[in-house]
Amino acid sequence: MSSKNKVKKSGGIGETIMVIVQALLLALVIRTVLFQPFSIPSGSMRPTLLEGDYLFVSKFSYGFSKYSLPLSPDLFSGRIWGSEPKRGDVVVFKLPSDTNIDYIKRVIGLPGDRVQMRGGALYINDEPVQREKIGTISNPDVTEQNRPVDVYRETLPNGVSYDTLDLAQGTMGDDTRVFEVPEGHYFMMGDNRDNSLDSRFGVGYVPYENLVGRANIIFFSIAGKASPLEIWKWPSELRGSRLLTSVNGKPDTEVTAP
């Protein structure tokens, strides 16, 4: 028999263990340095992100801090290869009051900014952010409401635009004091303006070190509080139009024009 047709025998259990270890190390490197999957557990970022969305967060977008590593070991302070977030980025960060908890919000205020809500409108450095009512959403899966909800499109000074929900007028978050963002910190807000615990309330200013990464791609989405493993629910609950959509684009939210 020709030696070309011989198959090399496996090295046995030792080789198998080595392959598994290498695969785990590769997965750890990818999760730590490149991309980490997150799921959305609440409605604070509706209509941009919905409960049941699963997305990839790029860990390298803002460089790396101790919070980029599993279990957040206190190996160093600050950030290495740091890059500043842009106004309008959707960011995962560690809650300043409890760094065991991950939050996801939109960057609204940069260091040195003055941020305020007046009558439901956002002001940055005493200038109103462009805000236009574009219609309503009547889908409870998007709004969590059994009625039409007003949708406003905001455009930040740097040109980033996104949709926000206005569940009601005159709520506590519609009129606030002026928030002066300290150096090295950011002011975060949810797109679901009347149902978001963010920098207006208990979250406060978010230190640069606490940023985990920038939300990029929705790779899976399922409604009805279903688990992705419940594949028998996919035909009725899978949100096919949201798969592989950009977080910084505008996933289909079925807006009805006024």
Image: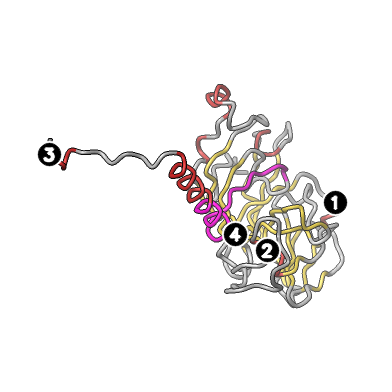
Mark 4 vs mark 1, CA separation in Å: 32 Å
Q: Nearer the viewer, residue 17 or 59?
A: 17
Position of residue 85 measured from the top left corner of the image (x, y, whole percent) = 62, 68
What residue did someone put label 3 on?
A: 2
Q: Residues within 10 Å of mark 1 (few under 14, many from 20)?
A: few
Position of residue 224 measured from the top left corner of the image (x, y, whole percent) = 66, 29
Amino acid carrying mark 3 in the image: Ser
- Write down the region rendered in magenta: 25-43
Mark 1 vs mark 3, CA separation in Å: 84 Å
Observer-side mark, 3 or 2, equals: 3
Mark 3 vs mark 4, CA separation in Å: 55 Å
The image shows residue 5, relative to residue 184, as above or below, that is: above
Q: Earlier in the sequence, mark 1 or mark 3?
A: 3
Residue at image point 59% right, 42% down: 255
Residue at image point 58% right, 42% down: 253
User: Mark on residue 214?
Assistant: 4
Amino acid carrying mark 2 in the image: Leu
What residue did someone put label 1 on?
A: 170
On screen, residue 20 versus residue 69, left or right, reads left
Question: Is residue 40 highlighted in magenta?
Answer: yes
Q: Earlier in the sequence, mark 4 or mark 1?
A: 1
Observer-side mark, 2 or 1, equals: 2
Mark 2 vs mark 1, CA separation in Å: 32 Å
